[in-house]
Structure formats: structure tokens, C-alpha cells
Image (spheres, helix red, strand yellow):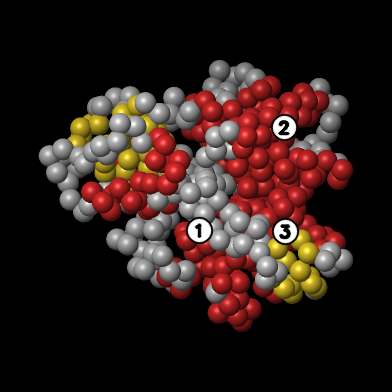
């Protein structure tokens, strides 16, 4: 793809409507049309650069050139991320807050998470064998809500699980939505923030005792750069930033089941694989192949030049996550599901970016990426080796690339479940 004197420009007056109508391929489609990894457009009334590919990802995660503060629209903060959370921060304050999250991702804590996930799969499987049919996505959300709260130290009554899981799911479902889906997400966030604020307040007052190694304890007593405890609202937002992403892995679990169904040779390889390498490759291919987050946004921090183009301070920049994980310059036959592509893969930190790119410790790459991978590995192991089931024939398993976030339309309906 070429670089010209002036970057290609989308001639539509404002492309917001086209983005909503086209969904995940919006940036990729125009990059292919313009034969460029960069083009200009207008979105929500603002000038914007859309960029795609490995070099684009490396640029996007250059903290000297890009900043997150002010880049995430309020409507997304009020549904998905929450206001004043780690995703909206930059510089030393971001590194300090990010270190808090990374401190929770020790090998011992990740091992505890895997154990909890296995236990919940076993407990859930005992319940599922008595069901005529079940929707995997819904059940996986509830399973992971239990896992997330136990691991994070959040007290959760069994009678609350369904409501809490649905709320966290609605937060995620709202990020690419307008109308009722968006408002459901905002209402869900308000409910969950009030619930978590009350828990953190009681932890601080020692009315609730939680282990010191848990996220609930860490968020309750974390101090900012000025030595102050986090505002109760901000502490709740950050604790939700632990629980919500774990519940969201239900989407990937559903895609794992779909991939096993549509690629039965993968199921056999997982069953026969003794050293677990293939399971890891399979998980990575599910993360690469199936659409999750479509893109991420930042603002230009200071004027700079890239590929002979001028980026002016304050300009919006969108990094194409979906297009980069389907870039034929990075992935051979990117529209084919092929876990074996990861046999000799060495990550550059900027090629496989479904959860962001760059340094996982210092940058804006999702601190929970290893959590996602670990939970997916445990889950596909159960789907392949610890249970049998039929896939209901009369269901719609199509995956829309317009709806953001997307999912198999039916949520993947299983029947005749047995151990």
C-alpha cells in the first residue's frame, strides 16, 4: 500500500452513519479501496485519521505521539468503561494506575483464577445435564460472573448472579449501539456502580473482610500519586474494570464452541494434543479470527509526521483492530480459520491486537489479556474433553459484522448435554 503527498480522504461529509451501517469492516474496506493503511474522514463531526496494520498499531501506542485523555466519547464511558478509569489516563498517572492492575496478575493469582474457572465449569456442567436445551452465551456469562466475583473478592449471592451477569453483558453490548441497547448499558452501569461503591465503602469501614491479594481490597485501599485513596466512584469503576472484562469472555467462549462446531478437525486435534500447544494456538486463532472490538481511539498529543503525512495536535485517530488481525500482509489467508498459523509465530506486540497492542505493563494494552487466554484455554478444554452435547440444528449461527459487538445470532444453543 502506498503513501502519497496527501492521504486518501473519504468524500462523505460525515462517515458516522456509514460506520454504524458497515460495522467491523468500515476501516478495512476503505483501506483496501484507497490502497493505503491511512485515510482521512469525519466522524461525529470531527476530523479523523483511520489507520490499520502493524506499523499503524506501533504508532498508535507511542505515548509521545498519542494520548487517551479526551479520546473516549462520554457515551462509551457512561456505558462500557466508566468515567475517570484507567483507559482514559495518560503519562505518569496512567502508569501508576496500570501498575495497580498488573499487580493483580501475578502467576499465583492467575493460577487461582484457572482453578476457580475449572470449578465453575464443573459445577455448571452438573446443572446443565438436566436441561433440555441451553444458550451457551447466557450460561457462560453467569459462570464467569461467579468466577470474576470470587477471584476479585466481591461478595455475590447466588440469587444475584443472573441479574449481575446480565448487567455486565449489557455494558459490553452498549459500546457499539444506539437507542435501547445503549440505554440498557447505561442503566446497567449505574446499578453496578452503586452496588460496587457500597461494597468498597464497607471494605474500608471493615464491615466486609476480603483477602488482601484480591482486586476488591486493592481498589479499596489504592492511593493515587498524591497519596490519597481513590474517590469511591473511581474505585468502583476500576473494580468493575476487573469484573466486567472477565464476564465479557463469554463472547470468546461462544466463538470457541462455534469454531469447534464449524471446524471438527480442530476438536479432534485438541482431544489428541498431549502437550497443550494446540489448545493455545486454537485460542489465539479464535481471538484473531472472530470480531470483538472493532477499533480503538486516541487523540494526537503533539504535531508529528508519519508516512509523509502531518498529524496535528488534537486530531482523532482510530486504530483498526479488526482489519489488522485480518491484514493479508500479516496473516496468510486471513479469512481462513487456521490455528496452525501460530506454530512458529513470534509476536511483535503490534500484530495480534484484538485487545490492544504495545507493552502490556507500561502501555495501553489490556492488562487482562493473559486472563482472557487462560480462561479460554480452560473453557475449550471443557468443551472438547469434559462434556458432550448436540448443537441444535434449528438455530441461526450467523455472525453479523455490522452489529458491534457481535455474536452468533442464536447465542449457540446446545442440547442433550452430558459428561
Q: Quadrant of residue 313?
A: top left
Asked which secondary structure carries label 3, the reply is: strand
User: Residue at image x 55%, y 51%?
Assistant: 406
Q: Position of residue 257 (x, y in %)?
A: 63, 66
Mark 1 or 2 closer to N-term?
Answer: 2
Q: Nearer the viewer, mark 1 or mark 2?
A: 1
Q: Position of residue 77 (x, y in %)?
A: 55, 29
Q: Are marks 3 and 1 in contact (CB under 8 Å)?
A: no
Mark 2 or 3 closer to N-term?
Answer: 3
Q: Which residue is mark 3?
A: 135
Q: Position of residue 328 (x, y in %)?
A: 32, 62
Asked which secondary structure carries label 1, the reply is: loop
User: Residue at image x 87%, y 43%?
Assistant: 159
Separation of disc 2 and disc 3 at Cα? 24 Å
Q: Which residue is mark 2?
A: 192
User: Residue at image x 41%, y 65%?
Assistant: 335
Among all residues in the image, which is located at the extreme left? 5
Amino acid at each position: 500500500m502506498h503513501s502519497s503527498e496527501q492521504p486518501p480522504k473519504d468524500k462523505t461529509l460525515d462517515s458516522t452513519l456509514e460506520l454504524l451501517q458497515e460495522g467491523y469492516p468500515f476501516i478495512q474496506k476503505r483501506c483496501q479501496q484507497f490502497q493505503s493503511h491511512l485515510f482521512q474522514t469525519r466522524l461525529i463531526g470531527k476530523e479523523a485519521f483511520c489507520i490499520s496494520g502493524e506499523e499503524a498499531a506501533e504508532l498508535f501506542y507511542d505515548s509521545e505521539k498519542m494520548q487517551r485523555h479526551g479520546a473516549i466519547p462520554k457515551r462509551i464511558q457512561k456505558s462500557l468503561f466508566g468515567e475517570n478509569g484507567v483507559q482514559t489516563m495518560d503519562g505518569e498517572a496512567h502508569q501508576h494506575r496500570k501498575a495497580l492492575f498488573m499487580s493483580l496478575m501475578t502467576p499465583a493469582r492467575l493460577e487461582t483464577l484457572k482453578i476457580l474457572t475449572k470449578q465453575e465449569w464443573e459445577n455448571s456442567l452438573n446443572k446443565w445435564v438436566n436441561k433440555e436445551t441451553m444458550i451457551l452465551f447466557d450460561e457462560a456469562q453467569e459462570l464467569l460472573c461467579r468466577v470474576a466475583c470470587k477471584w476479585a473478592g466481591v461478595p455475590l449471592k447466588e440469587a444475584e448472579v443472573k441479574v449481575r451477569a446480565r448487567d455486565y453483558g449489557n455494558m459490553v453490548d452498549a459500546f457499539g449501539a444506539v437507542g435501547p441497547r445503549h440505554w440498557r448499558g447505561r442503566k446497567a452501569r449505574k446499578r453496578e456502580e452503586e452496588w460496587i461503591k457500597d461494597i468498597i465503602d464497607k471494605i474500608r469501614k471493615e464491615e466486609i473482610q476480603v483477602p488482601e491479594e484480591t482486586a476488591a481490597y486493592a481498589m479499596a485501599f489504592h492511593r493515587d500519586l498524591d497519596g490519597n485513596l481513590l474517590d469511591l466512584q473511581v474505585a468502583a469503576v476500576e473494580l468493575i474494570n476487573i469484573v466486567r472484562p472477565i464476564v465479557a469472555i463469554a463472547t470468546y467462549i461462544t466463538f470457541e464452541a462455534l469454531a469447534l462446531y464449524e471446524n471438527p478437525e480442530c476438536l479432534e486435534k485438541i482431544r489428541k494434543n498431549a502437550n497443550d500447544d494446540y489448545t493455545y494456538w486454537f485460542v489465539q486463532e479464535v481471538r484473531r479470527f472472530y470480531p470483538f472490538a472493532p477499533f480503538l481511539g486516541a487523540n494526537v498529543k503533539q504535531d508529528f509526521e508519519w508516512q509523509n503525512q502531518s498529524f496535528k495536535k488534537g486530531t482523532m485517530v482510530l486504530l483498526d483492530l479488526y482489519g489488522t488481525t485480518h491484514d493479508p500482509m500479516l496473516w496468510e489467508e486471513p479469512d481462513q480459520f487456521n490455528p496452525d498459523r501460530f506454530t512458529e509465530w513470534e509476536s511483535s506486540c503490534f500484530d495480534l491486537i484484538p485487545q490492544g497492542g504495545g507493552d502490556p505493563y507500561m502501555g495501553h494494552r489490556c492488562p487482562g489479556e493473559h486472563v482472557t487466554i487462560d480462561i479460554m484455554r480452560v473453557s475449550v478444554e471443557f468443551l472438547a474433553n469434559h462434556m458432550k452435547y448436540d448443537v441444535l440444528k434449528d438455530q441461526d449461527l450467523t455472525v453479523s459484522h455490522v452489529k458491534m459487538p457481535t455474536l452468533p445470532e442464536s447465542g449457540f444453543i446446545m442440547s442433550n448435554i452430558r459428561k
